Image (cartoon, rainbow, N blue to C red):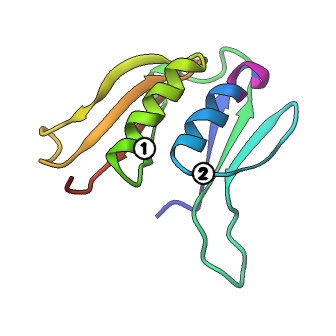
């Protein structure tokens, strides 16, 4: 359903280690960046069908409603969810739910939840049967 998503942050240089680490843990390549944005994944092109693209963009502090920001990324397996969680904590993230099953969603919903350095709620989830 999604083609691309942008996440707002207040300080790119503070957020870059976090996103570099968690996207790498989920197997998403960094494709670029500068003082105002970071990019991960691949952009769609007319002649191919590739994965969605994530951009992290700098905003003026206070312009985004922090209480409504939640981003969930698919993990290829449960080990990637665990790696995502550890990478987040090692790079300025804060725990909002350790890796584990979330049977309230479904029997095999394995996820971890963190806050990035700017308060975005970031989730990694694997739906596969272990």
Q: Horizontal and vertical percent for residue 130?
A: 21, 52
Observer-nearest of 26 and 34: 26
Measured in 3D between alpha carbons, the distance from the residue under mark 1 to the one under mark 2, in whole angstroms, is 11 Å
**SS for tag 1?**
helix
- Residue farthest along the right direction in this orientation: 35
> In the image as oriented, which residue stretches furthest toward the bottom?
47
* Residue 37 image label: none
Disc 1: which residue: 80
Residue position marked by numbered label 2 in the rendering: 28
Q: Are marks 1 and 2 in contact (CB under 8 Å)?
A: no
Q: Position of residue 65 (x, y in %)?
A: 54, 22
**Local secondary structure at mark 2:** loop
Q: Position of residue 13 (x, y in %)?
A: 78, 22
* Residue 88 falls inside the magenta stretch: no
Where does the magenta region start and end? 12-16
Tell me which corner region of the image, top left, top right, bottom left or bottom right, holds residue 63.
top right
For the residue pair 117 and 87, the one nearer the viewer reads as 87
Q: Residue 25 or 58: which is nearer the viewer?
A: 25
Q: Nearer the viewer, residue 58 or 78?
A: 78
């Amino acid at each position: 359903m999604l083609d691309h998503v942008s996440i707002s942050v207040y300080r790119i240089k503070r957020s870059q280690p976090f996103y570099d680490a968690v996207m790498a843990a989920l197997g998403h390549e960094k494709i670029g960046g500068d003082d105002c944005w970071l990019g991960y994944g691949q952009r769609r092109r007319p002649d191919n069908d590739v994965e969605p693209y994530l951009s992290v963009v700098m905003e003026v502090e206070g312009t985004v409603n922090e209480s409504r920001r939640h981003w969930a990324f698919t993990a290829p397996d449960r080990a990637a969810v665990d790696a995502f969680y550890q990478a987040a904590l090692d790079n300025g993230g804060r725990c909002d739910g350790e890796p584990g099953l979330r049977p309230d969603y479904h029997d095999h919903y394995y996820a971890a939840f963190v806050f990035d350095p700017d308060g975005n709620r970031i989730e990694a989830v694997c739906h596969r049967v272990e």
